[in-house]
Every structure is written in structure tokens, then in C-alpha cells.
Image (cartoon, helix red, strand yellow):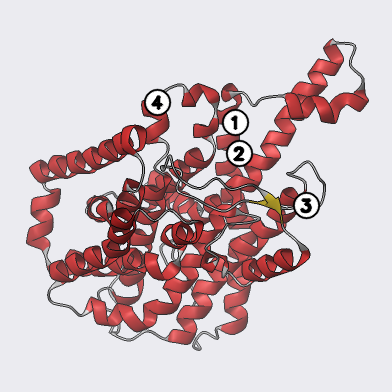
């Protein structure tokens, strides 16, 4: 019996790409003085955790669709699953890490030194100040080992080398749990109740942080990126797919002509309210919106996109698939590319100063450190990130992935191996 063709969620590909671009702007665009001079714009660009959390929900939803969707068996071949997930994730991480380490070694004033500082709650006026310091040899080797093994998200003190790559580390943990938890969650006949339980479970640690007024770097680091504490987001995505499959009447009400606009309004209201909290309140509210309060809006956003009936046969759908599958590469590459762009841009300005003044070429390093990046050049950087990440994904990552799968996965005789952009 032929397996039913799998539904393609074109809008979810666009969403993956949009989330990645927003994260790029969160880490780079909001740091420009011109943006900081616009408080509301700066606040809206300071909610990068919404992007990461939505991506985790989206990952759970899509993996459940691919492995446990219509026509699929209730059990998952664990060996095949782990090889496919690692072959998709690890090449992105290791190649980006090889690029990031030399840049990290040249980022400080002292060549060959990697500077770190403890993560703290940036929303908290009374957060303990931490002084950046150089990693010693032991710290360097320990963190190198954590990064090479994709375990760096378990370090609660700081991120190092390629800071956004902690999300890839968290995804690895989520992938490990998926074959064991997803079939059981997928089988529930009360997905709304289970989603409510997951939302409350996710919110519980942040309620403790809120009412205890805890501000320690270790507690903040755990709330920010500890894979176990962030797991409910991924699990909620799995259960959301069960809602998608089991409750069409609910979805028709939420995503119909009238319900769609109410749903969009709710998501925008949540974002606006969070931006207001960031701008005017801050403090421990960070943990409530970071770890729980925004999860309903993130679930609704994924569901709205899943219910969008975009034709997968169009040219734009093909572009969406390519950009969607490159989203993790954008996550991994945008900080190293920003560091490179900063050096090139500042050196170019310094070289122009040398040409137009009586400064000497030997003054180039010093002059470059005095230069500021221009907001007008930012669109070029953003375009480079998109193009470079897409090429990185297709020319390097996909080829390494396919070779690893061909090496460790032996297809049955007479079958042809194909890989979906949403697998």
C-alpha cells in the first residue's frame, strides 16, 4: 500500500526564515545608536527569545508531522532518526565553530585571548555586575569540549565562541527525547489539557524566579538556555500537531476569516505588551515572558502558519523551502559573519581616513578600533548573511549530511533516498 503524500507547510518555511532573520536583528541591529535612540523600535527588537522559543515549538511540530503524521507508524526507528538528526545538525555547528573560534581569539585587545562574562538578566536594574575576564587554559579546553560535543547549553555561567549556537545544543537534547516521548504525546486524546499542563509546567520555574527575586548568574543561565527547562516548548510543539490532527473544528474557529484576525491581534498584543514591559518595567518580568507567558502566542503563531494553504508547487514555495532549511545556518553563522563584517567595515573606513589625511598605514589597526559601524551598510550585511547561509547550507552542510547518511544508513534495495526540507 502506498504511503500518502506528506503535506508541505510552505508558510512554516517562511516562518522559520523570518524567525532566523529576527534573531539576526536582535543580536546586531538593535546595537546601533540610531536604533537605540528609538525606544519603541529598540524594545521590539529586544525580544529575541520569542524567535528562539517559537523555533523550538516549530521544530516539535514539524518533526511530529514528518515521523508520526498520517500514514506513518506509531514507532520511530531510533537509529535512523538519530543519524538523520545529527547529520543535519552537527555539520552546521562544527563548521560554524571552526569559523567562530579564530574570530573569538582576535576579538579582544589581546590576541589569542577569549573573553567571557557571566550572563545576567539584562532587564534587571539591580542585576549583579560582572567583569569580563579571559578564559584560562582549563576553561578554554572544557568549553572547547562542550562545544565540540554540542553540550554547551548545559553551562549556566556564560556562552563562548559562538553564542547563539546554544540553541543547536538544546535542539540536540530535544532530538534525543523525541523518539521516546513523541509517540506517547502524539497518542493523547486530550491535547488541549496536555498543552495547558505543559504551559503551566514551563511557567513554574519562572514564577519561582519572579517571586523570589533571584538574580544570580547561574539561575539566569539555566532559565535562559538549560535544555531541560526549555524542553516544554519543544513538547508543546509535538502536542500542537495532535491538536492540528484531532481538532479541525477548533482550528477552523481560530484560523477562519474572523478568528484569524483575532488570533493575529492576540499575537501582536502579546508582543507589544512584552515590549512595554521591557521598556518601562523590566526586572523579573523577563523570566515570566521568556519562560511561559508567551508560549500560547507562539503556539498560535505556528498554528496560523500551518493552516495557511499556500501552494507548494509555486516558485515562491521553492524559495521558502531553501530559506527555511537554511534557517539553522543563519542561527549559527550570523554572529561570526557580524564579527567579520565589523572588522572589514571599520578597516575600510580607517583606510579611507589614511588616504584622505596625513595618517600612515601603520596607524590602520588603531584607527579601525576608533571607527563606528554605519547603519546604512547594515542591509548589505543582512543580504550577505542570507546568501552566505543559503550557500553554506546547500554547498557544504547538505553534502556532508548526505554523505553521512549514505555512510551510516543503508537504504533498502530498490528504494531511493530522498530528503525533505522539513525533515
Q: Which residue is mark 3?
A: 113
Classify 10 Å Cα crowding around label 3: few (below 14), some (14-19), many (20 and above): some
Q: Is residue 174 left or right of residue 252?
A: right
The answer to which of marks 4 and 3 sits earlier in the sequence is 4
The vertical placement of 168 against 124, above or below, is: below
Query: How much space separates mark 4 and mark 1, taking CA atoms?
Result: 24 Å
Classify 10 Å Cα crowding around label 2: few (below 14), some (14-19), many (20 and above): some
Q: Is residue 228 left or right of residue 352?
A: left
Q: Which mark is residue 39?
A: 4
The answer to which of marks 4 and 1 sits earlier in the sequence is 4
Residue lying farthest top? 357
The vertical placement of 148 against 387, above or below, is: below
Between 125 and 5, the one nearer to me in the picture: 125
Q: Which structural element holds mark 1? A: helix
Classify 10 Å Cα crowding around label 1: few (below 14), some (14-19), many (20 and above): few
Q: Residue at x 23, y 63 (%)?
A: 199
The answer to which of marks 3 and 2 sits earlier in the sequence is 3
Query: How much space separates mark 3 and mark 2, taking CA atoms?
Result: 28 Å
Q: Are marks 2 and 1 in contact (CB under 8 Å)?
A: yes
Residue 401 position in % (x across, y down): 59, 69
The vertical placement of 415 against 290, above or below, is: below
Residue 50 position in % (x across, y down): 36, 48
Q: Which structural element holds mark 3? A: loop
Amino acid at each position: 500500500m502506498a504511503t500518502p503524500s506528506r503535506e508541505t507547510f510552505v508558510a512554516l518555511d517562511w516562518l522559520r526564515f523570518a524567525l532566523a532573520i529576527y534573531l539576526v536583528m536582535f543580536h546586531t541591529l538593535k546595537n546601533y545608536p540610531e536604533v537605540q535612540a528609538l525606544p519603541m523600535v529598540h524594545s521590539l527588537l529586544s525580544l529575541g527569545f520569542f524567535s528562539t522559543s517559537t523555533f523550538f515549538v516549530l521544530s516539535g511540530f514539524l518533526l511530529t508531522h514528518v515521523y508520526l503524521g498520517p500514514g506513518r507508524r506509531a514507532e520511530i526507528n531510533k537509529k535512523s532518526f538519530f543519524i538523520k538528526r545529527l547529520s543535519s545538525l552537527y555539520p552546521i555547528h562544527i563548521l560554524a565553530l571552526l569559523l567562530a573560534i579564530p574570530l573569538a581569539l582576535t576579538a579582544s585587545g589581546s590576541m589569542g585571548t577569549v573573553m567571557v562574562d557571566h550572563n545576567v538578566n539584562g532587564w534587571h536594574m539591580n542585576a549583579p555586575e560582572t567583569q569580563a575576564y579571559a578564559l584560562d587554559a582549563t576553561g578554554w579546553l572544557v568549553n572547547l569540549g562542550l562545544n565540540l560535543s554540542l553540550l554547551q547549553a548545559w553551562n549556566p555561567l556564560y556562552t563562548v565562541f559562538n553564542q547563539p549556537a546554544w540553541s543547536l545544543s538544546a535542539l540536540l537534547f530535544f532530538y534525543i527525547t523525541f523518539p521516546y516521548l513523541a509517540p506517547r504525546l502524539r497518542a493523547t486524546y486530550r491535547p488541549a489539557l496536555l498543552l495547558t499542563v505543559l504551559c503551566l509546567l514551563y511557567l513554574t520555574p519562572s514564577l519561582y524566579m519572579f517571586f523570589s527575586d533571584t538574580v544570580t548568574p547561574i539561575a539566569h543561565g539555566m532559565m535562559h538556555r538549560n535544555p531541560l527547562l526549555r524542553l516544554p516548548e519543544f513538547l508543546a510543539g509535538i502536542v500542537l500537531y495532535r491538536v492540528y490532527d484531532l481538532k479541525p473544528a477548533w482550528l477552523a474557529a481560530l484560523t477562519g476569516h474572523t478568528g484569524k484576525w483575532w488570533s493575529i491581534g492576540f499575537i501582536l498584543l502579546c508582543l507589544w505588551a512584552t515590549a512595554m514591559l521591557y521598556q518601562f518595567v523590566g526586572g523579573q518580568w523577563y523570566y515570566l515572558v521568556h519562560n511561559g507567558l508567551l508560549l500560547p502566542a507562539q503556539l498560535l503563531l505556528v498554528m496560523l502558519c500551518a493552516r495557511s494553504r499556500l501552494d507548494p508547487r509555486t516558485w515562491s514555495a521553492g524559495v521558502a523551502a531553501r530559506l527555511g532549511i537554511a534557517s539553522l545556518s543563519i542561527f549559527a553563522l550570523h554572529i561570526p559573519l557580524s564579527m567579520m563584517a565589523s572588522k572589514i567595515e571599520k578597516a575600510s573606513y580607517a583606510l579611507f581616513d589614511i588616504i584622505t589625511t596625513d595618517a600612515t598605514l601603520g596607524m590602520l589597526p588603531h584607527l579601525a578600533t576608533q571607527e563606528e559601524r554605519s547603519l546604512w551598510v547594515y542591509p548589505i550585511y543582512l543580504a550577505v548573511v542570507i546568501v552566505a547561509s543559503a550557500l553554506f547550507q546547500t554547498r557544504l552542510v547538505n553534502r556532508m549530511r548526505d554523505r553521512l547518511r549514505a555512510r551510516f544508513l543503508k537504504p533498502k534495495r530498490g528504494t531511493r533516498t530522498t530528503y525533505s526540507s522539513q525533515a
